[in-house]
Amino acid sequence: MTTTSTLSQWKSALPFWVSYLLIPLIWATALAGGWWVALVPLSTWWAFAVLDRLTGLNLENADPKTPDSVLPRYILLTKLWVPVQLLTLYGLIWYATRSDLSVLEKIGLFFGMGVISGTIGINYSHELMHQRDRLERWLGDILLAMVLYSHFRSEHLLVHHRYVGTPRDPVTARYNEGFHRFYPRVLKQSLLSAFQAERDKLGRNDRPWTDPANPFWRYWALQAGMLLLALLIGGWSGLALFLIQAGTAIWQLELVNYVEHYGLTRKYLGEGKYEHVRPRHSWNASQKASNWLLINLQRHSDHHYKPNRRFPLLQHHSQDAAPQLPHGYPVMTIAAMIPPLWRRIMNPRVRAWRKQYYPEITDWQPYNKSENPQPHA
């Protein structure tokens, strides 16, 4: 058990600040040009895959009842990232549209920026949106607007957490569903389900979807502001570079979503009811280095069990309670892009998970094809 006094020290919080090293790195690659622009994706994927091998697993848990007063260094980490990413993104648009970089170099540079705003920015927005503090939720909205994916907040909070592992949740990747099929499906269904969830929420109070309380008005306004700023700073070229970064970030997010729940389903109990969410319904990974970069996102089993728990307090769950990924997200997301390799790694693990937790279920076809009845609202 990590003690409260240890958790409050800088030496415990500092490794999670490793993401900030990506800011000088991307500026250095922008100034150097050439193949150097590939350094950001290489550093987030390959370097952290190697670091995971060197640092191993972190199986220690902090006291989950630790108050926020002990965690200011962790809370500041996610808050401060918002202006840092904003200045970096638009600063790079200003620089790239006035530099001698070739078209390919600019595309590579903003692919790298998208890796940052997806791997770090969307991940930090996820942490912020789960908090009670209104400022933190607003900061999360700003990060999502920078990648044109603001509806993720509504989809995640109102749909994903409530219906994960059921046919109602678009983000739960089905058994044997390759990422090339999951990605276009989730792009469409997530937007529609998010809008429907907000519309239904307003409808329960006899208010139309056009009501000013619908957060989609805020989403659209923030996104329009981000697009306009890119256009004003860099012209049409700046707008195109912004879109490259946003598209890359969304792809990064959905790769992670694909990994987190692949093949894991909640047991159908009949009459539109499903078992409660438990740690077993998310893949857990406690690789130390990549959890520094991803602020413990890979302890996803505990996040779904206690969604409002701040990231330094997320718990590791053993194999008895939650299924374990063989590697951290840097390796698993690369594997997800190669469907035969992914199936070879993960399908046997899904089958073992089914045998371990649900030996009484003999027909998995309705779960594989999302043919079970929709859960009651």
Image (cartoon, grey):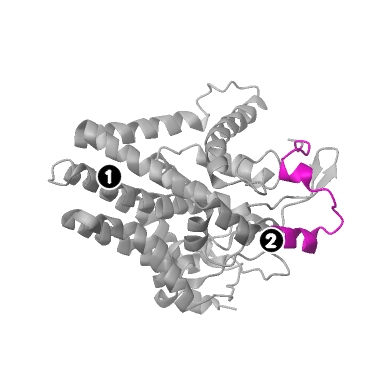
Tags 2 and 1 touching, CB below 8 Å = no
Q: Residue at x 52, y 60 (%)?
A: 332
Q: Which residues are magenta?
A: 348-375
Task: Let me know if residue 232 appears in the view.
Answer: no
Locate the N terminus and report the quarter of the image it occupies: bottom right
Closer to the camera, 305 or 63? 305
74 up-or-down from 30: above or below: below
Q: Residue at x 69, y 61 (%)?
A: 348
Q: Which numbered dot is residue 205?
A: none
Report which residue position mark 2 lands on: 348
Position in image of residue 312 (x %, y %): 52, 66
Q: Residue type at mark 1?
A: Ile
Dot 1 crowding, Cα within 10 Å, few <14, some 14–19, many 20+: some
Mark 2 or 1, closer to the camera: 2
Q: Residue type at mark 2?
A: Pro
220 up-or-down from 267: above or below: above
Position in image of residue 158 (x %, y %): 61, 40
Closer to the camera, 194 or 134? 194
Report which residue position mark 1 lands on: 107
Q: Residue at x 73, y 58 (%)?
A: 351
Position in image of residue 165 (x %, y %): 69, 47
Locate the C terminus and report the quarter of the image it occupies: top right
Is residue 371 one of those drawn in magenta? yes
Task: Let me know if residue 106 appears in the view.
Answer: yes
Residue at the outermost front position: 340
- SS label for mark 1: helix
